[in-house]
Amino acid sequence: MPEAAEVQSMFGRIARRYDLLNRVLSMGVDQGWRRRLLARAGDVRGRRIVDVCCGTGDLSMAFGRAQGRVLGIDFTHEMLEHAVPKVEKARGVESSGLVFAQGDAMCLPVCDASVDICCVAFGIRNVADRRVGLREMRRVLRPGGQALVLEFAPPPPGLFGAAYRFYFTRILPLIGGWISGDAEAYRYLPRTVLEWPDPDEFQREMEGEGLMDCGHELLAGGIACLHWGHSGGKDH
């Protein structure tokens, strides 16, 4: 599990270049993955949404454009410093329905059973204890509420997986280190992805923390995965 203080410090150092690096290193497909999560969420108009590990706010803003009532939470203050002006400049985002707060994914500053959707995109890997993070997501969901997790997956087998592994472990750290000035941060990324459980195993972890009707969808040939589940209740 990653050390909390080290993760917080690392993301604070790269916050200024974080959006640029996401677009460059994923060749822009990360935005499409977020849109897939939004589509899975369905009609979110007026619904209460918590975006955990929200970073600079890309997913929070997508839910805001869809007229959701969003609370974006991140462990790193520097990330939120970049999220707020992005919202102010963005078109189609109602700022009154989008709030950011600093907080820990393992102790969300949210009441029990109070939100309709709790989601996290590319952040659960960085939580010191992901099972506690999943437990917190379930805790804040109302009966029938939806949990959505978008995360990288270990490279799939075969030629494509081998090529992706080479890019991820050799090329990406070089580019990321050059643009951000922090090579270690972009060695951390492939290291944590390679240590991540396969989609079936992570789905079992979600189920083990009390989420129901869980499933997952592989994206982009299996390099990312969208997971979902529901809290217990009659509303889903």
Image (cartoon, rainbow, N blue to C red):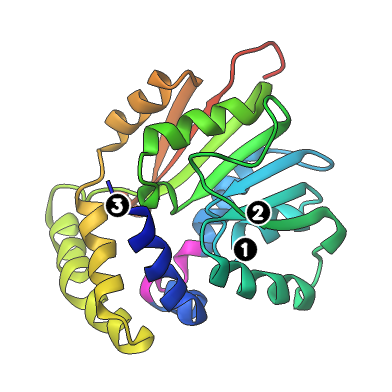
Q: Is residue 198 above or below residue 182?
A: above
Identity of the residue drawn at 44% across and 52% down: 123
Q: Is residue 235 left or right of residue 183?
A: right
- The x, y position of residue 101, in whole percent, is 67, 56
Question: In 3D space, how far apart are the residues under numbered discs 1 and 3 (Cα atoms)?
Answer: 22 Å
Frontmost residue, 77 versus 229: 77
For marks 1 and 2, the one nearer the N-term is 1
- The x, y position of residue 195, in whole percent, is 20, 48
For marks 3 and 2, the one nearer the N-term is 3
Q: Is residue 81 left or right of residue 98?
A: left
Badge 1 is on which residue? Answer: 57
Secondary structure mostly taken by the magenta-highlighted segment of the chain: helix
Identity of the residue drawn at 21% across and 77% down: 171
Frontmost residue, 38 versus 76: 76
Q: Is residue 155 above or below residue 50?
A: below
Rendered image quadrant of residue 87? bottom right
Which residues make up the magenta segment?
25-30
Q: Residue 72 shows which numbered tag? A: 2
Please name which of the two marks, 3 or 2, marks the residue nearer to the observer.
3
> Does 99 appear in magenta?
no
Question: In 3D space, how far apart are the residues under numbered discs 3 and 2 (Cα atoms)?
Answer: 22 Å
- Under mark 2, the amino acid is Gly
Identity of the residue drawn at 42% across and 63% down: 8
Badge 3 is on which residue? Answer: 2
Q: Is residue 61 left or right of residue 176?
A: right
Rendered image quadrant of residue 234? top right
For marks 1 and 3, the one nearer the N-term is 3
**Which residue is outermost to the top?**
234
